[in-house]
Image (spheres, grey):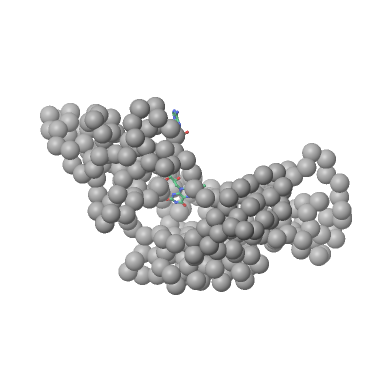
Amino acid sequence: RASVRGQFQTIEPQEIRVVLIEAGQRVLPNFDPSLSDYTLQSLRKMGVEVDLGAAVTGIDADGVSYGDKRLETKAIVWAAGVAASPVAKWLGIEGDRAGRVKVEPDLSVPGHPDIYVIGDAASMLDEKGKPVPGVSPAAKQQGKHVARLIRQKLAGDNTALPFKYKHAGDLATIGKRRAVIDFGWIKLKDWMAWWLWGVAHIYFLVEAQTRITVTVSWLWTHLTGQRSARLITHGEATSRAPLKEIDEA
Ligand SMILES: Cc1cc2nc3c(=O)[nH]c(=O)nc-3n(C[C@H](O)[C@H](O)[C@H](O)COP(=O)(O)OP(=O)(O)OC[C@H]3O[C@@H](n4cnc5c(N)ncnc54)[C@H](O)[C@@H]3O)c2cc1C
Protein backbone atom coordinates (compact mmCIF):
# COMPACT_ATOMS: atom_id res chain seq x y z
CA ARG A 1 0.00 0.00 0.00
CA ALA A 2 2.84 2.39 0.83
CA SER A 3 4.28 2.00 -2.66
CA VAL A 4 1.08 3.18 -4.40
CA ARG A 5 0.27 6.03 -2.00
CA GLY A 6 0.06 9.31 -3.91
CA GLN A 7 1.00 7.65 -7.20
CA PHE A 8 -2.33 6.82 -8.83
CA GLN A 9 -5.38 9.02 -9.24
CA THR A 10 -7.87 6.15 -9.36
CA ILE A 11 -6.48 3.83 -6.68
CA GLU A 12 -7.11 4.44 -3.01
CA PRO A 13 -4.42 2.66 -0.96
CA GLN A 14 -6.75 1.83 1.94
CA GLU A 15 -9.05 -0.07 -0.44
CA ILE A 16 -6.30 -2.36 -1.73
CA ARG A 17 -6.33 -6.02 -0.70
CA VAL A 18 -3.27 -8.13 -1.45
CA VAL A 19 -4.07 -11.85 -1.36
CA LEU A 20 -1.27 -14.39 -1.72
CA ILE A 21 -2.48 -17.83 -2.80
CA GLU A 22 0.02 -20.65 -2.23
CA ALA A 23 -0.69 -24.29 -3.13
CA GLY A 24 1.81 -25.65 -0.57
CA GLN A 25 1.38 -25.83 3.19
CA ARG A 26 3.95 -23.07 3.81
CA VAL A 27 5.53 -20.13 1.99
CA LEU A 28 9.16 -20.45 0.81
CA PRO A 29 9.13 -24.27 1.12
CA ASN A 30 12.83 -24.58 0.19
CA PHE A 31 13.79 -22.61 3.34
CA ASP A 32 13.96 -23.85 6.93
CA PRO A 33 10.41 -24.04 8.46
CA SER A 34 11.33 -21.35 11.05
CA LEU A 35 12.10 -18.91 8.20
CA SER A 36 8.85 -19.86 6.44
CA ASP A 37 6.99 -19.01 9.68
CA TYR A 38 8.83 -15.68 9.96
CA THR A 39 7.95 -14.89 6.32
CA LEU A 40 4.28 -15.72 6.87
CA GLN A 41 4.08 -13.51 9.99
CA SER A 42 5.92 -10.67 8.19
CA LEU A 43 3.56 -10.80 5.22
CA ARG A 44 0.53 -10.76 7.52
CA LYS A 45 1.97 -7.81 9.48
CA MET A 46 2.32 -5.95 6.18
CA GLY A 47 -1.38 -6.56 5.51
CA VAL A 48 -1.02 -9.40 3.00
CA GLU A 49 -3.76 -12.04 3.28
CA VAL A 50 -2.04 -15.40 2.85
CA ASP A 51 -4.12 -18.42 1.84
CA LEU A 52 -2.16 -21.69 2.07
CA GLY A 53 -2.86 -25.21 0.84
CA ALA A 54 -5.12 -24.39 -2.12
CA ALA A 55 -3.97 -24.51 -5.74
CA VAL A 56 -5.26 -22.08 -8.35
CA THR A 57 -7.56 -23.95 -10.72
CA GLY A 58 -8.69 -21.13 -12.98
CA ILE A 59 -8.04 -17.51 -13.90
CA ASP A 60 -10.31 -15.32 -16.00
CA ALA A 61 -10.87 -11.63 -16.62
CA ASP A 62 -12.94 -11.31 -13.42
CA GLY A 63 -10.94 -13.27 -10.90
CA VAL A 64 -9.25 -16.39 -9.62
CA SER A 65 -10.68 -19.78 -8.61
CA TYR A 66 -8.68 -21.76 -6.06
CA GLY A 67 -9.56 -24.69 -3.81
CA ASP A 68 -13.31 -24.27 -3.28
CA LYS A 69 -13.04 -20.47 -3.27
CA ARG A 70 -13.44 -17.66 -5.75
CA LEU A 71 -11.72 -14.25 -5.53
CA GLU A 72 -13.17 -11.48 -7.69
CA THR A 73 -10.33 -9.28 -8.94
CA LYS A 74 -9.02 -7.60 -12.07
CA ALA A 75 -5.39 -7.52 -10.94
CA ILE A 76 -3.70 -10.93 -10.94
CA VAL A 77 0.04 -11.54 -10.74
CA TRP A 78 1.07 -15.10 -11.65
CA ALA A 79 4.25 -16.07 -9.80
CA ALA A 80 4.06 -19.87 -9.87
CA GLY A 81 7.13 -20.61 -11.94
CA VAL A 82 8.35 -20.18 -15.47
CA ALA A 83 8.30 -22.38 -18.56
CA ALA A 84 11.52 -23.14 -20.41
CA SER A 85 12.05 -22.40 -24.10
CA PRO A 86 10.71 -25.48 -25.93
CA VAL A 87 14.20 -26.90 -26.56
CA ALA A 88 13.11 -30.50 -25.87
CA LYS A 89 10.40 -30.16 -28.52
CA TRP A 90 12.84 -28.66 -31.05
CA LEU A 91 15.26 -31.54 -30.47
CA GLY A 92 12.45 -34.13 -30.56
CA ILE A 93 13.47 -35.58 -27.20
CA GLU A 94 11.85 -36.17 -23.82
CA GLY A 95 11.26 -33.07 -21.72
CA ASP A 96 10.05 -32.72 -18.14
CA ARG A 97 6.73 -31.17 -17.06
CA ALA A 98 8.08 -27.63 -17.59
CA GLY A 99 9.46 -28.46 -21.05
CA ARG A 100 13.09 -28.66 -19.91
CA VAL A 101 15.52 -31.17 -21.41
CA LYS A 102 16.32 -34.11 -19.13
CA VAL A 103 20.09 -33.97 -19.53
CA GLU A 104 22.78 -36.59 -18.87
CA PRO A 105 25.00 -36.15 -15.77
CA ASP A 106 27.56 -34.26 -17.94
CA LEU A 107 24.76 -31.91 -19.17
CA SER A 108 24.70 -33.39 -22.67
CA VAL A 109 21.49 -34.30 -24.47
CA PRO A 110 20.72 -38.06 -24.32
CA GLY A 111 22.02 -39.66 -27.52
CA HIS A 112 23.79 -36.42 -28.57
CA PRO A 113 27.09 -36.15 -26.66
CA ASP A 114 28.03 -33.02 -28.63
CA ILE A 115 24.92 -31.04 -27.64
CA TYR A 116 24.75 -29.55 -24.15
CA VAL A 117 21.78 -27.91 -22.44
CA ILE A 118 22.37 -25.69 -19.40
CA GLY A 119 20.55 -23.27 -17.13
CA ASP A 120 16.78 -22.92 -17.05
CA ALA A 121 16.39 -25.17 -20.11
CA ALA A 122 18.07 -28.15 -18.38
CA SER A 123 16.49 -30.58 -15.93
CA MET A 124 18.64 -32.76 -13.68
CA LEU A 125 19.03 -34.02 -10.12
CA ASP A 126 21.93 -33.10 -7.86
CA GLU A 127 24.03 -35.60 -5.88
CA LYS A 128 21.39 -35.72 -3.12
CA GLY A 129 18.64 -36.55 -5.62
CA LYS A 130 17.10 -33.06 -5.42
CA PRO A 131 16.34 -31.13 -8.63
CA VAL A 132 19.01 -28.57 -9.52
CA PRO A 133 17.10 -25.28 -9.07
CA GLY A 134 16.44 -22.83 -11.90
CA VAL A 135 18.60 -20.06 -10.45
CA SER A 136 21.54 -18.02 -11.72
CA PRO A 137 24.26 -19.80 -9.66
CA ALA A 138 23.22 -23.16 -11.17
CA ALA A 139 23.25 -21.70 -14.71
CA LYS A 140 26.69 -20.13 -14.16
CA GLN A 141 28.19 -23.31 -12.69
CA GLN A 142 26.79 -25.35 -15.58
CA GLY A 143 28.21 -22.86 -18.09
CA LYS A 144 31.68 -23.23 -16.54
CA HIS A 145 31.35 -27.02 -16.51
CA VAL A 146 30.43 -27.24 -20.19
CA ALA A 147 33.21 -24.79 -21.14
CA ARG A 148 35.64 -27.12 -19.36
CA LEU A 149 34.28 -30.20 -21.19
CA ILE A 150 34.54 -28.47 -24.57
CA ARG A 151 38.14 -27.41 -23.83
CA GLN A 152 38.94 -31.02 -22.87
CA LYS A 153 37.32 -32.34 -26.07
CA LEU A 154 39.36 -29.93 -28.18
CA ALA A 155 42.45 -31.32 -26.47
CA GLY A 156 41.36 -34.86 -27.45
CA ASP A 157 39.92 -35.96 -24.08
CA ASN A 158 36.27 -37.12 -24.38
CA THR A 159 35.73 -37.97 -20.68
CA ALA A 160 32.11 -37.11 -19.82
CA LEU A 161 32.74 -35.59 -16.37
CA PRO A 162 29.50 -35.35 -14.36
CA PHE A 163 28.29 -31.90 -13.27
CA LYS A 164 28.19 -31.35 -9.49
CA TYR A 165 25.96 -28.53 -8.30
CA LYS A 166 27.23 -26.53 -5.31
CA HIS A 167 24.32 -24.89 -3.52
CA ALA A 168 25.57 -21.84 -1.59
CA GLY A 169 22.21 -21.08 0.06
CA ASP A 170 18.85 -19.39 -0.43
CA LEU A 171 18.05 -15.70 -0.07
CA ALA A 172 14.64 -14.05 -0.35
CA THR A 173 13.45 -10.53 0.30
CA ILE A 174 9.99 -10.11 1.78
CA GLY A 175 9.66 -6.34 1.98
CA LYS A 176 11.44 -3.25 3.21
CA ARG A 177 14.07 -4.29 5.78
CA ARG A 178 12.72 -7.86 5.85
CA ALA A 179 14.41 -10.85 4.26
CA VAL A 180 15.41 -14.42 5.02
CA ILE A 181 18.69 -16.20 4.35
CA ASP A 182 19.27 -19.94 4.69
CA PHE A 183 22.88 -21.00 4.17
CA GLY A 184 22.21 -24.32 5.93
CA TRP A 185 24.91 -23.68 8.55
CA ILE A 186 23.50 -20.25 9.37
CA LYS A 187 19.99 -18.84 9.13
CA LEU A 188 19.29 -15.10 9.19
CA LYS A 189 16.13 -13.05 9.12
CA ASP A 190 14.88 -9.47 9.43
CA TRP A 191 16.92 -6.32 8.65
CA MET A 192 20.34 -7.99 8.80
CA ALA A 193 19.28 -10.56 6.20
CA TRP A 194 17.76 -7.75 4.11
CA TRP A 195 21.04 -5.78 3.96
CA LEU A 196 23.02 -8.93 3.21
CA TRP A 197 20.51 -9.83 0.46
CA GLY A 198 21.11 -6.41 -1.13
CA VAL A 199 24.91 -6.60 -0.84
CA ALA A 200 24.94 -10.13 -2.32
CA HIS A 201 22.85 -9.10 -5.32
CA ILE A 202 25.00 -6.05 -6.02
CA TYR A 203 28.22 -8.05 -5.60
CA PHE A 204 27.17 -10.56 -8.27
CA LEU A 205 26.28 -7.91 -10.87
CA VAL A 206 28.68 -7.58 -13.76
CA GLU A 207 30.79 -4.41 -14.15
CA ALA A 208 31.48 -1.73 -11.54
CA GLN A 209 29.27 0.76 -13.42
CA THR A 210 26.18 -1.46 -13.05
CA ARG A 211 26.96 -2.02 -9.36
CA ILE A 212 27.19 1.72 -8.72
CA THR A 213 24.03 2.50 -10.73
CA VAL A 214 21.99 -0.19 -8.95
CA THR A 215 23.32 0.83 -5.50
CA VAL A 216 22.41 4.50 -6.05
CA SER A 217 18.99 3.57 -7.47
CA TRP A 218 18.20 1.20 -4.55
CA LEU A 219 19.38 3.72 -1.93
CA TRP A 220 17.24 6.41 -3.56
CA THR A 221 14.17 4.14 -3.54
CA HIS A 222 14.89 3.08 0.05
CA LEU A 223 15.35 6.59 1.41
CA THR A 224 12.61 8.40 -0.53
CA GLY A 225 10.12 5.57 -1.13
CA GLN A 226 9.88 6.78 -4.75
CA ARG A 227 10.04 4.41 -7.70
CA SER A 228 10.72 5.31 -11.29
CA ALA A 229 8.22 2.71 -12.60
CA ARG A 230 4.54 3.49 -13.08
CA LEU A 231 1.63 1.23 -13.96
CA ILE A 232 -0.93 2.60 -16.41
CA THR A 233 -4.20 1.14 -15.17
CA HIS A 234 -6.75 2.84 -17.43
CA GLY A 235 -6.83 4.40 -20.87
CA GLU A 236 -8.77 7.32 -19.43
CA ALA A 237 -8.20 8.13 -15.79
CA THR A 238 -11.03 9.76 -13.89
CA SER A 239 -9.90 10.97 -10.53
CA ARG A 240 -11.96 9.82 -7.54
CA ALA A 241 -10.00 12.06 -5.21
CA PRO A 242 -7.41 14.76 -5.74
CA LEU A 243 -3.86 13.44 -5.33
CA LYS A 244 -3.37 15.64 -2.24
CA GLU A 245 -6.24 13.88 -0.44
CA ILE A 246 -4.90 10.46 -1.35
CA ASP A 247 -1.52 11.52 0.02
CA GLU A 248 -3.05 12.58 3.32
CA ALA A 249 -5.24 9.44 3.64
C1 LIG B 1 11.42 -12.69 -12.29
C2 LIG B 1 12.61 -13.59 -12.04
C3 LIG B 1 13.39 -13.36 -10.92
C4 LIG B 1 14.49 -14.16 -10.67
N1 LIG B 1 15.25 -13.92 -9.56
C5 LIG B 1 16.33 -14.66 -9.33
C6 LIG B 1 17.15 -14.38 -8.20
O1 LIG B 1 16.88 -13.47 -7.41
N2 LIG B 1 18.25 -15.16 -8.01
C7 LIG B 1 18.58 -16.17 -8.86
O2 LIG B 1 19.60 -16.82 -8.65
N3 LIG B 1 17.82 -16.45 -9.94
C8 LIG B 1 16.70 -15.73 -10.20
N4 LIG B 1 15.92 -16.00 -11.30
C9 LIG B 1 16.28 -17.12 -12.16
C10 LIG B 1 17.43 -16.74 -13.09
O3 LIG B 1 17.13 -15.54 -13.78
C11 LIG B 1 17.63 -17.86 -14.10
O4 LIG B 1 17.77 -19.09 -13.43
C12 LIG B 1 18.88 -17.64 -14.95
O5 LIG B 1 18.81 -16.40 -15.62
C13 LIG B 1 19.01 -18.78 -15.96
O6 LIG B 1 20.02 -18.48 -16.88
P1 LIG B 1 19.90 -19.01 -18.36
O7 LIG B 1 21.16 -18.59 -19.03
O8 LIG B 1 19.54 -20.44 -18.36
O9 LIG B 1 18.64 -18.27 -19.00
P2 LIG B 1 18.41 -16.72 -19.26
O10 LIG B 1 19.18 -15.88 -18.31
O11 LIG B 1 16.92 -16.57 -19.32
O12 LIG B 1 19.04 -16.50 -20.69
C14 LIG B 1 18.47 -17.07 -21.84
C15 LIG B 1 18.72 -16.13 -23.00
O13 LIG B 1 18.35 -16.79 -24.20
C16 LIG B 1 17.63 -15.91 -25.00
N5 LIG B 1 16.75 -16.72 -25.86
C17 LIG B 1 15.58 -17.32 -25.53
N6 LIG B 1 15.08 -17.97 -26.59
C18 LIG B 1 15.96 -17.81 -27.59
C19 LIG B 1 15.99 -18.24 -28.96
N7 LIG B 1 15.02 -18.96 -29.49
N8 LIG B 1 17.07 -17.88 -29.69
C20 LIG B 1 18.07 -17.14 -29.16
N9 LIG B 1 18.08 -16.68 -27.90
C21 LIG B 1 17.04 -17.01 -27.13
C22 LIG B 1 16.87 -15.03 -24.03
O14 LIG B 1 16.53 -13.80 -24.62
C23 LIG B 1 17.89 -14.86 -22.91
O15 LIG B 1 18.74 -13.76 -23.12
C24 LIG B 1 14.81 -15.21 -11.57
C25 LIG B 1 14.03 -15.42 -12.70
C26 LIG B 1 12.92 -14.62 -12.93
C27 LIG B 1 12.08 -14.87 -14.17
* Corner quadrant of residue 232: top right
Image location (x, y in percent) of residue 54: 55, 59
Does any portion of residue 207 appear in the rendered image? yes
Residue at figure coordinates x 80%, y 61% from the top left = 247
Ligand 1's quadrant is top left
Image location (x, y in percent) of residue 216: 56, 53
In the figure, 197 relative to 231: above or below? below
Image location (x, y in percent) of residue 163: 24, 45
Does any portion of residue 194 appear in the rendered image? no
Assign the C terminus to one quadrant of the image.
Answer: bottom right
How many numbered marks are there? 0
Q: Residue furthest front?
A: 68
Residue at figure coordinates x 31%, y 45% from the top left = 124
Which of these two is toward me, 211 or 225? 225
Q: Viewed as shown, does residue 107 lie left or right of 83?
A: left
Assign the N terminus to one quadrant of the image.
Answer: bottom right
Q: Viewed as shown, does residue 244 lie left or right of 230?
A: right
Q: Viewed as shown, does residue 22 lie left or right of 163?
A: right
* Corner quadrant of residue 85: top left
In the figure, 58 relative to 180: above or below? above
Which of these two is toward me, 78 or 137? 78
Which of these two is toward me, 225 or 153? 153
Q: Residue furthest left?
A: 156
Residue at figure coordinates x 67%, y 44% from the top left = 60
Image location (x, y in percent) of residue 142: 30, 43
Residue at figure coordinates x 46%, y 53% from the top left = 202
